[in-house]
Image (cartoon, rainbow, N blue to C red):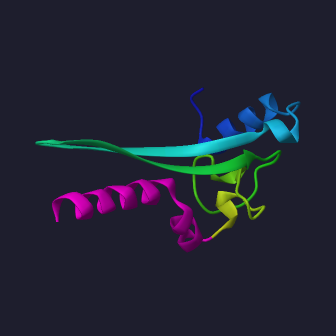
Amino acid sequence: MNADDHTKNIELLKRMENVEEDKRGCKYVNCIALKYRDIEEVFEGVLYGTLTRHCTGKNGFGFDEIFRIDSGLTLAEITMEEKFKISPRKKALDQMKMFLINNYI
């Protein structure tokens, strides 16, 4: 489908409309690979959530408006500061940072 994120989200929600709440779990996974000389490592950050029934919120992009986190809010309803704290990308980068500190610094 060649459309903007909001249109794609609406289409996804339409296709999922008959799916029960307990089967609407989803996760956002971010992997970062590090390869340099003798290093070959992959670091993974995960954020678990549930797929909403309606688009909610104005912050963010992509699937943020349909990805509900434990607080009951979507990623599009929280601040960038709050989003940064739970970011799978940040989790993966923090893992990589600790790996480098523990093994090479």
The answer to whether residue 46 is left or right of residue 77 is left
| Picture quarter with the N terminus | top right
Residue 78 to residue 41: above or below: below
* 97 is within the stretch colored magenta: yes
What number of labels is visible? 0
Which percent across, then down, holds residue 77? 69, 64
Q: In front here: 57 or 36?
A: 36
- Image quarter of residue 56: bottom right
* Residue at figure coordinates x 50%, y 54% from the top left: 88
The answer to whether residue 25 is left or right of residue 30 is right
Which percent across, then down, holds residue 104? 17, 59
The answer to whether residue 53 is left or right of residue 47 is right
* Extent of the magenta region: 79-105
* Residue at figure coordinates x 66%, y 36% from the top left: 8
Which percent across, then down, holds residue 12? 72, 33
* 42 is within the stretch colored magenta: no
Q: Single out the residue that lies furthest toward the left.
A: 37
